[in-house]
Amino acid sequence: MTNILNICGFLAVLSLFIYSFGTLAVAEQTPAPKESPALEVQIKDVVTNPGEYNGKKVALEGKVTKIDYRNSAKGELFTIFKLKDSENNEVGVYFEDERLPLSKGDRVKIMGRFWKEKSYFLYKIKNVIKARTVNVI
């Protein structure tokens, strides 16, 4: 009887071991999801319909206004600025890890993730983009 229990236990452990390796092999064969491309939009589009673009990657152009350089609570550098179009529609932009060499009035093209509302400690900021790239044009 003991031998039968030992054999059953061994087979149970062996089947779990084989199952674990089988799922690892499947995971390695599954390709990583492709990063979705940024939507080319106008500032006016995201301001007038923020729910449609919330959480999505966008690419847009505008003129830099109200630029500021700050350090996070952890001491990390970041750049924040407003981006306006010719009709005075405006979004906030922040870029982490660097102080960008921008000046008020520069025309830039940015790509990043748009948020209808973003919370920072006690502040709630509307229509803001966490930029991944900022290029002066």
Image (cartoon, rainbow, N blue to C red):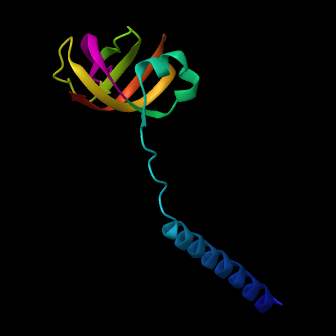
Which quadrant does the N terminus fall into? bottom right
Figure quadrant of residue 113: top left
Q: Reply yes or no: does residue 84 show up in magenta.
A: no
Residue sticking out furthest to the front? 86
The residue nearer to you, when weighing 97 against 65, is 65
Which residue is rendered at x = 59% and y = 70% of the image? 23
Where residue 4 appears, as percent x and y from the top left, is 79, 90
Which residue is rendered at x = 48% and y = 16% of the image? 47
Q: Reply yes or no: does residue 62 show up in magenta.
A: yes
**Residue 118 at least partly seen:** no
Residue sticking out furthest to the right? 1
> How many discs appear?
0
Vertical placement of residue 38 versus 25, above or below? above
Where residue 81 appears, as percent x and y from the top left, is 30, 15
Q: Is residue 105 left or right of residue 125?
A: left
Where residue 42 appears, as percent x and y from the top left, is 41, 23
Which quadrant does the C terminus fall into? top left
Which residue is rendered at x = 45% and y = 27% of the image? 114
Dominant secondary-structure state across the stretch colored magenta: strand
Where residue 75 appears, as percent x and y from the top left, is 26, 23
Vertical placement of residue 104 versus 25, above or below? above
Q: Is residue 94 left or right of residue 116?
A: left
**Residue 35 at least partly seen:** yes
Q: Is residue 118 left or right of residue 85?
A: right
Q: Which residues are magenta?
A: 60-80
Figure quadrant of residue 37: top left
Which residue is rendered at x = 26% and y = 16% of the image? 70
